Amino acid sequence: MNINVFFVGISLALLMIFIGFKPLDIKQQEFVDIPLFQLEDFTLHELNEKGLITLMKGTKATRYANRYKVANMNYTDNSKEFVANMKSDDGVYKDKEEVIDLKGNVLYNREDGLIFESDEASYNKKTSIAKTNKNYVIYRDANRVVGTSLIYNNSLNRVKSKNVVAKYQIKER
């Protein structure tokens, strides 16, 4: 066997490998929003020099760099005049903004007996304002209001709403 035939055969084999096989296209993925840790059946307490100001419970939470994503959220704000408790199927607590976004069977309950229910709501802890753009029911004792959007200021005890139907009782003196 001639050495030239051997090198031509090797060259043809390498050429076939080069044409027949493509290099691997490795896809790189950037992870922008990586969970830092997860909690199950938890209670978080936020304290300051005055005492307990926030209590958050849930069945599962995932902590990201700027928020907690919570299943079966039960959030209590004790930082204002009236204690406000919010429950929902799912919630997101954005700690830098101090905003809580609630979704699914939202129940807002204030210690003086004011309650509102909706499918979703947002609560700003700094301003004590609860908002929803969904249908809602708000009631206290025998008084009841139904509407399509709500802005409730817990500090000023003021309500703004659209498409309101109200049923209330007036006490006579």
Image (cartoon, rainbow, N blue to C red):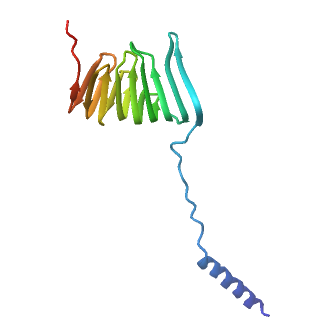
Residue drawn at the location 40% of the way across and 29% of the way down:
107
Residue drawn at the location 36% of the way across and 32% of the way down:
121
Residue drawn at the location 19% of the way across and 9% of the way down:
172
**Left or right: 10 with respect to 132?**
right
Q: What x and y, as percent, mark residue 84?
A: 41, 20
Q: How many marks?
A: 0
Q: What x and y, as percent, mark residue 32?
A: 51, 44
Q: What x and y, as percent, mark residue 37?
A: 59, 36
Query: For the C terminus, which image quadrant?
Result: top left
Query: For the N terminus, which image quadrant?
Result: bottom right
Judge whether residue 69 can be spotted in this image: no
Q: What x and y, as percent, mark residue 63?
A: 54, 35
**Left or right: 40 with respect to 100?**
right
**Left or right: 52 with respect to 97?**
right
Most foreground residue, 61 or 58: 58
From this viewpoint, which residue is outermost toward the right? 1
The image quarter in which residue 161 lies: top left
- Would you place residue 19 above or below residue 30 in this image? below
Most foreground residue, 25 or 11: 25
- Would you place residue 52 above or below residue 35 in this image? above
The image quarter in which residue 105 lies: top left
From this viewpoint, which residue is outermost toward the bottom? 1
Residue drawn at the location 55% of the way across and 34% of the way down:
59
From this viewpoint, which residue is outermost toward the top? 173
Most foreground residue, 140 or 163: 140
Most foreground residue, 105 or 125: 105
Judge whether residue 100 can be spotted in this image: yes
- Would you place residue 64 above or below residue 11 in this image? above
